[in-house]
Amino acid sequence: MRSWTMASALALTALLSTGWAQAQTSDRDDRDNRDGEGGHNRDRFALGVGVGLVEPSGGVETYYTAALRIRVSGRDEDASRRHASGDEGVTGYIEPEVGYWKASGTHGKGQDTLLGVNLIGVVPFGSVDSFFGVGAALHSIDKSLLEGNTTLSGTDSKFGADAQFGIDIYITRSLSAFGTGRFDLVQGAQSKVQSKVYLGLRARF
């Protein structure tokens, strides 16, 4: 899957969801106002799990991920006032994450496990949130994948960096479905860029 294809797919998803999101916005606001919170003093934490595809080099493999968002700015005690004026701003999160994929054998052998942390900005639009972020990670990656040589054994630890973007579509007040497009650069890898696209669910509490 090429990078432009991933970006186009996410953009198309966002466009298709816009009409549905606008129809749901007033209902969501009514529920939030009945709760007396403006709907935006929550979401201090958000746990997301997802599955999708990764393209390391010449092939596509299954990718699994889980991440915990921890709010650090944005929707504070003034959120109700900003919501009423239509100016909600950007909410900032720190996001520890874990990711994993394994080569099926068709395009090589080995596996890559990452432990990382991201800085995420979330922009709310009614029943849809868009987000963007950058991060760093430590990859525990098999040498056979790292150097593209199936005869190698053992595992190396390499630093990586990522950039990502995506959308969340709210299903309920505290649960959303999300889609993410992402690019990871891995130090010393034969295929320096790993292109990823994945879908999942995110619960807020």
Image: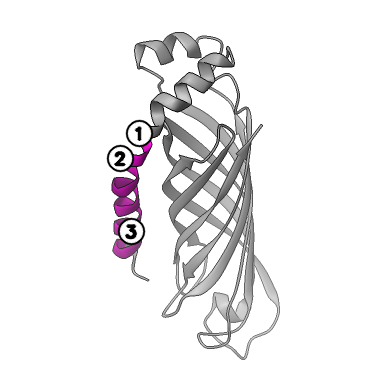
Label 2–label 3 contact, CB within 8 A: no
Mark 2, residue position:
19
| Horizontal side, residue 54 vs residue 15: left or right | right
Q: Residue at x 45, y 72 (%)?
A: 191
Q: Amino acid at mark 3?
A: Ala
User: Residue 9 shows which numbered tag?
Assistant: 3
Residue 36 visible from this viewpoint:
yes
Vertical placement of 204 versus 53: above or below?
above
In which quadrant of the rendered image does the N terminus lie? bottom left
Q: Earlier in the sequence, mark 2 or mark 3?
A: 3
Which region is colored magenta? 4-23
Q: Position of residue 131 (x, y in %)?
A: 43, 39
Q: Is residue 38 at all visible to an observer of this figure?
A: no
Verify whether residue 66 appears in magenta. Answer: no
Does residue 2 sit above or below 11 in this rendering?
below
Tag 2 near tag 1, CB within 8 Å: yes
Q: Which residue is mark 1?
A: 23
Rendered-image quadrant of the C terminus = top right
**Circle nearer the N terminus (1, 3):** 3
Helix, strand or loop under label 1:
helix
* Residue type highlighted by circle 1: Ala
Which residue is rendered at x = 46% and y = 75% of the image? 60
Would you say 4 lies left or right of 56 here? Answer: left
Q: Position of residue 63 (x, y in %)?
A: 56, 66
How far across and down, in percent of the image, does residue 96 sit? 64, 44
